[in-house]
Image (cartoon, rainbow, N blue to C red):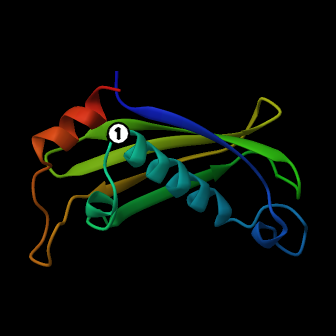
């Protein structure tokens, strides 16, 4: 089973827009926060996080989230390619799905382009 993680947080005032619900960009930060927690749990740090730029992102908004509401974000590995990885994520409030999306990153450890995942990273992403 591919790697996955869940994190819980509360919507902060700075993450809201003028309507007092989440700013559209907040969900991307929660997904990235969950992804970084997953990398740490898998035993990897800045050496990976600093070498995986995003190449595609998408988000679907299903429910507004208001200041102070608790959010549970689930993130999982959806697909691992030779040098890419797609993560899928959902954010829930009171058990109700509020947003879902995905982002794809590419392993690019230097400025000359992408490179295949090291086998230890690939194995960790594919089995949690």
Q: Residue furthest bottom?
A: 111
For the C terminus, which image quadrant? top left
Where is residue 100? Give x, y as percent.
Answer: 60, 44
Q: Residue at x 73, y 45 (%)?
A: 62
Q: Nearer the viewer, residue 41 or 121?
A: 41
Q: Quadrant of the N terminus?
A: top left
Q: In the shown orientation, is residue 73 left or right of residue 51? A: right
Q: Name the residue under label 1.
A: 42
Write the residue at 50% across / 57% down.
32
Report the side of 87 relative to 82 (left or right).
right
Q: What element does badge 1 sit on? A: loop
Q: Is residue 13 visible?
A: yes
Where is 95 relative to 13, above or below? above
**Location of residue 29 by image quarter:** bottom right
Q: Residue at x 21, y 59 (%)?
A: 107
Where residue 66 appears, as percent x and y from the top left, is: 88, 55
Mark 1 Cα shell of 10 Å, populated few (<14), some (14-19), many (≥20): some
Q: Can residue 102 be seen in this view?
A: no
The residue sitting at 32% across, 43% down in the picture is 43
Percent from the top left, x then y, of residue 46? 33, 63
Relative height, residue 16 to residue 2 (above, below): below
Placement of 28 over or under 18, stated as above or below: above
Judged left or right of residue 63, residue 73 is left
């Amino acid at each position: 089973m591919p790697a996955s993680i869940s994190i819980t947080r509360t919507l902060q005032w700075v993450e809201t827009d003028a309507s007092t619900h989440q700013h559209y960009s907040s969900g991307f930060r929660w997904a990235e926060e969950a992804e970084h927690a997953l990398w740490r749990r898998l035993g990897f740090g800045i050496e990976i996080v600093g070498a995986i730029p995003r190449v595609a992102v998408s988000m679907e908004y299903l429910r507004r989230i208001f200041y102070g509401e608790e959010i549970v974000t689930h993130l999982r590995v959806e697909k691992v390619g030779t040098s890419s990885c797609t993560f899928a994520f959902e954010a829930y409030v009171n058990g109700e799905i509020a947003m879902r999306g995905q982002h794809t990153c590419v392993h690019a450890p230097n400025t000359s382009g992408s490179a295949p995942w090291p086998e230890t990273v690939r194995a960790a992403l594919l089995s949690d």
